[in-house]
Image (spheres, rainbow, N blue to C red):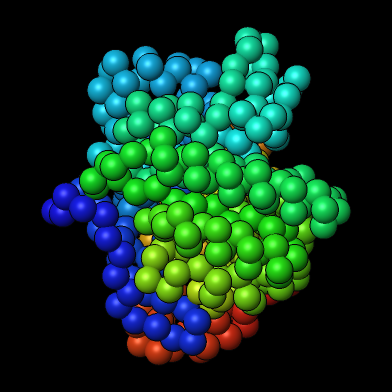
Amino acid sequence: MTQRFSFEVEARDGRARKGVISTPRGEIRTPAFMPVGTAATVKAMMPESVCATGADILLGNTYHLMLRPTAERIAGLGGLHKFMNWDRPILTDSGGFQVMSLASLRKLTEEGVRFASHIDGSKHMLSPERSMEIQKLLGSDIVMCFDECPALPATDAEVAKSMALSMRWAQRSRDAFGDRPGHALFGIQQGGVTKDLRAESAEALRAIEFDGYAVGGLAVGEGQEAMFGVLDYAPDMLPEDKPRYLMGVGKPDDIVGAVERGIDMMDCVLPSRSGRTGQGWTRHGQVNMRNARHKDDPRPLDEACGCPACRNYSRAYLHHVIKADEIIGSMLLTWHNLHYYQDLMAGLRDAISTGALAGFVADFHAKRAGGDI
Ligand SMILES: Cc1ccc(CCc2c3nc[nH]c3cc3c(=O)[nH]c(N)nc23)cc1
C-alpha cells in the first residue's frame, strides 16, 4: 500500500485509457464509476454491499455533511471513513454545486457563498478556505476545488465571468489545501460549452497544478449531444498523465461515450436514485419494475447478471415489493443497478486492455432494445 497518490495509464484504445489510481487507502481501477454517498451512506446499501458491487471508491458531500451532522462532529468521531464504516478511498465534492441547487437565500461574492440550510434554515458560509477545511475534517482522500457551476441557460459573458471566479477560487483552494501527502486535490474545468473558455480554464488549472482534473459544468441539462460535443475536445486540454473526472455522469450510454472520449472517473445518483423508484438498468436497456406486466414473470430482472437480486428473485417478486413500497425493493434494485454499472466499467476496462473497445461499444448499443423491456 502506497503512502502517495499516483495515477498510471496501463493501456489505451483510441482516446480511451485504462489505468489505476493508487492511494494510501487502496487502488481505484479506471475507468471508474463512483457511487454517490451524499449523507455518509449510499442510500439503501450497506457499505459491504457497495464493496461487493465492485466499487473501489465512493463519494461524500461537503454541503450535506457540513449541515448535518457537521464536519467537526465527524472529525471528533474519527473521520468519515470510520463514521460510515468504509475504509477505501472517498472523494468529496466541494459543496458549491449543491449550495446552488439545494440551499436558499444564497449570496454569492468573491469571498464565497452565504446561504441558508435547506434542512433548518440556519445560516452558513462556504468559501475555498472553508471547503478545504471541511474536506480535511472529513478526511476524504480526493478533495475537489471549491468552484461555481453556472446554471443553464447562461450567456457566454456569464459563463466567462463564472469560470474566471472559479479559477480564482481554484488558486485559493490550492493555497488552503497545503501539502497533504497521500491526499489529492482535483481542479475543476469550467467554461460551459464554449471551446475558448474551456481552453482558458484548462490553462489556468495547469498553471496551478493539481493531482487530477475534473470536467465540470456539464450534466446540468445541456443534453447528451452538447455534452459529447464538449468531450470531443475538453479532456485533451487537461494533462494527459493525470486522472480526468467527469462530474455527474450519467446514464450507461453517457458513460460509454465519455470513456471513449478519454474520461477516467464518473459519478451519478442515477443507479441508486432510480433504483428507489423501481427502475432497473440492464444490458438490454431500462426496465420499469412498477409495470404490471411483471406480475407473474418468474424470470430474473437480467438473466446475465450475477447480483443477489438477479440470482435469488423473480421479476414478479421485485414488482410486488416495489408496488408495496417495501424497503427490500429499494435495496434489491439499488444493488442490481450499482452491480450493473460496475459490470459495465469492468467490461470497458477489459475492452481497452485488449484493444477491443470499438467492438464492445458496438455490442453495447446492439443489445439495447429501444424503450422498456
Ligand atoms: C456526493 C456527490 C454528488 C454529486 C457530485 C457532482 C456534483 C456536480 C455535478 N453533477 C452534475 N453536473 C455537475 C457539475 C459539477 C461542477 O461543475 N462542480 C462541482 N463541484 N460539482 C458538480 C459529487 C459528489
Q: Is residue 184 visible?
A: yes
Q: Is residue 311 visible?
A: no
- As drawn, is 48 to the left or to the right of 296? left
In the rendering, at what x and y percent does residue 346 appear?
39, 69
In the rendering, at what x and y percent does residue 202 appear?
56, 63
- As drawn, is 95 to the left or to the right of 12? right
Q: Residue at x 35, y 31 (%)?
A: 136
Q: Residue at x 33, y 53 (%)?
A: 56
For residue 307, what is the image quadrant? bottom left
- As drawn, is 224 to the left or to the right of 248? right
- Counting the numbered discs, the total is 0
In the rendering, at what x and y percent does residue 260 appear?
54, 77
Q: Residue at x 45, y 17 (%)?
A: 70
Q: Residue at x 38, y 17 (%)?
A: 72
For residue 90, what is the image quadrant? top left
- As drawn, is 295 to the left or to the right of 243? right
Question: Is 76 drawn above or below residue 360 in the view shown?
Answer: above
Q: Which residue is situated farthest in the left direction here?
A: 1
Q: Quadrant of the C terminus?
A: bottom right
- 300, 366: nearer the viewer: 366
In the rendering, at what x and y percent does residue 66 appear?
49, 22
Question: Is 96 drawn above or below residue 122 in the view shown?
Answer: below
- 319, 331: nearer the viewer: 331
Question: Is 357 drawn above or below residue 65 in the view shown?
Answer: below
